[in-house]
Amino acid sequence: MTWTVAAQTATPTPIAPDSTAEATAEATIDPNHVELLTPEIISKRPHDPTAWTEGLLLQDGFFYESVGVNEHSSVRKVDPFTGKVVQQFAMGKDDYAEGIAIVGDRLLQMTYKQEIVYQYDWKTLKQLPDTLKYQGEGWGLTYDSAANVLWMSNGSPSLFKRDPKTFEVLDTIPVTLDGLAIDTITARGRSLGGLNELEVVGDTIYANIWPTTFILRIDKASGIVTGVIDGSTLLAADAPIEADAREYLNGIAYDPATGHFLITGKYWPYTFEVTWKSVGVMPPMQ
């Protein structure tokens, strides 16, 4: 794989991982030790191939999925094993749904350019009358229950901590890889700067990079990337999907009962239950 940093190019031959090391949900932070990982498939499950997935989370044994695009946006409760939609709220024709998070009894759903957060009773998917406001675009969203904050992305190379009641910005965390801003790095010709759908696990945030099959593992306190996950091998060559959509990996949920992740993509026909396998360490980029 070719990685480009500004005008410099490096082709990293992965440094072999420690034979005793295991890839876990969290990682000890070391800015000079960026793991390269791949997903190991445990199971493959059906997913609605017409769903432009913007947000995904697991709650009480069900997926809650935000599906985007004007005139087709919705929030759904989905059986995680069959992909069947068991409950749905269809949004207005001008709404473009984005990331979601559950905070207490509320499900929060951002919009792309409307600068509105819709709120729902997550158990019934009844839309509540009160909305929250923000400036700019909305992309990914996840709730950090340990810190009682929301983490948000907007397609930039930074993460934003927001108040779960007011949606006020509490902090901005630039994301870096080997000391470099992620929007200065490309892999397979695509920038790593487009932080999108998010999932927080302890002290770690996992972020899809739009439009790629890469997921970054990020230390939430510092914004330092501790691992790069390459999901390009998930879909088989004969998977029933358009060629462009293969790059649209988007949707990360974590199951604390198993320690496994569930990942899918926009228009992907499958959701994959996976763990991460360490395949090496990135050589220095600078």
Image (tube, rainbow, N blue to C red):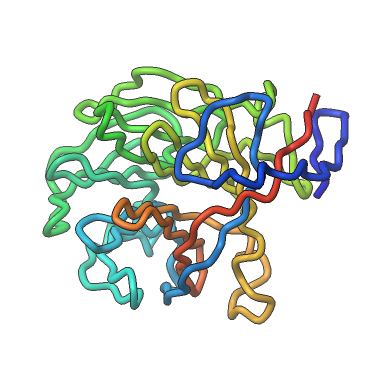
**Can residue 273 be seen here?**
yes
Left or right side of 185 for 27: left
Residue 29 rendering spot, x and y as whole percentages: 54, 27
Left or right side of 168 for 105: left
**Can residue 94 be seen here?**
no
Residue under the image location 65 percent in, 47 percent down: 19
45 in relation to 129, above or below: below
Residue under the image location 43 percent in, 75 percent down: 45
Residue 155 rendering spot, x and y as whole percentages: 54, 37
Left or right side of 166 for 246: right
Q: Residue furthest front?
A: 20
Residue 261 rendering spot, x and y as whole percentages: 43, 56
Residue under the image location 53 percent in, 39 percent down: 217
Q: Nearer the viewer, residue 1 or 89?
A: 1
161 in relation to 114, above or below: above
Residue under the image location 66 percent in, 60 percent down: 232
